[in-house]
Image (cartoon, coloured by chain):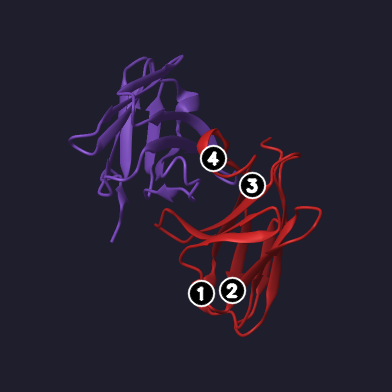
Chain colours: A purple, B red
Amino acid sequence: DQQVKQNSPSLSVQEGRISILNCDYTNSMFDYFLWYKKYPAEGPTFLISISSIKDKNEDGRFTVFLNKSAKHLSLHIVPSQPGDSAVYFCAASLYQAGTALIFGKGTTLSVSS
Amino acid sequence: DSGVTQTPKHLITATGQRVTLRCSPRSGDLSVYWYQQSLDQGLQFLIQYYNGEERAKGNILERFSAQQFPDLHSELNLSSLELGDSALYFCASSVGTGGSYNEQFFGPGTRLTVL
């Protein structure tokens, strides 16, 4: 049973527009969420994270929103750039326990110029 | 560059064989995690070591084993290989375990192909 789900395998966006990537989770015990970006032939790289005590975290063009009641988080990229084209993975964990990350299957973002 | 190194980059072997994947964590990181990414799958957690001790186990098959050495590098041993073991294997490291130490940095991965 998948605990972290990214239901959209792919997303295409034009340069300059907003990209919204979505993620749902089933385990209400998760209290720390992360987004990783992955280019082909490279390992995932950390992008942004959010603790369950917050509902928003911003870092430059990237903002993550968390809706605990809906068990849903989203990553907003504004404005989108062609270099953002990559696979984006949502991950969840139990913060204090330091457990391993539970990943979704990823969403491939394509930003066209 | 995350600072996590993995060798080899590619590995091609036959069914029934045994291979060893190696990972060196970032300088100062005590925790090492192993993940498997099969086709169309997300990253599946296999096993975690912290300062030489096994900390947590995920979906790791009995044919697979790992260890972390005193210099903190880690090895993942895969034996009696099957076609379905073909995948990308990632190693990640973090400073510690729990709290703010849980952000993990990933290596570039080892692509294993079993023929």
Distance from disc 3 to disc 2, alpha carbons, whole Å, reads 20 Å
Chain to which the residue tagged by mark 4 belongs: B
Q: Earlier in the sequence, mark 2 or mark 4?
A: 2
Mark 3–mark 1 contact, CB under 8 Å?
Answer: no
The nearer-to-camera label among 1 and 4 is: 4
Q: Residue at x 59, y 79 (%)?
A: B81
Q: Is residue B54 placed above or below A57 in the rendered structure?
A: below
Q: Amino acid at mark 3?
A: Pro
Kindly report which numbered mark, 3 or 2, lies closer to the viewer in this rendering: 2
Asked if residue A25 is positioned above or below residue A2 in the image, the reply reads above
Q: Which disc, if any, is residue B61?
A: 1
Pointer 3: what residue?
B108
Q: Position of residue A28 (x, y in %)?
A: 26, 45
N-term-proximal mark, 3 vs 1: 1
Q: Quadrant of the N terminus of chain B?
A: top right
The three-letter code of the residue at mark 2 reads: Phe
Report the number of numbered marks: 4
Q: Are marks 3 and 4 on the same chain?
A: yes
Circle 3 — which element? loop
| Badge 3 vs badge 4, beta-carbon distance below 8 Å | no
Q: Earlier in the sequence, mark 3 or mark 4?
A: 4
Q: Are marks 3 and 2 on the same chain?
A: yes
Residue ID for mark 4? B102
Q: Residues within 10 Å of mark 2 (few under 14, many from 20)?
A: some
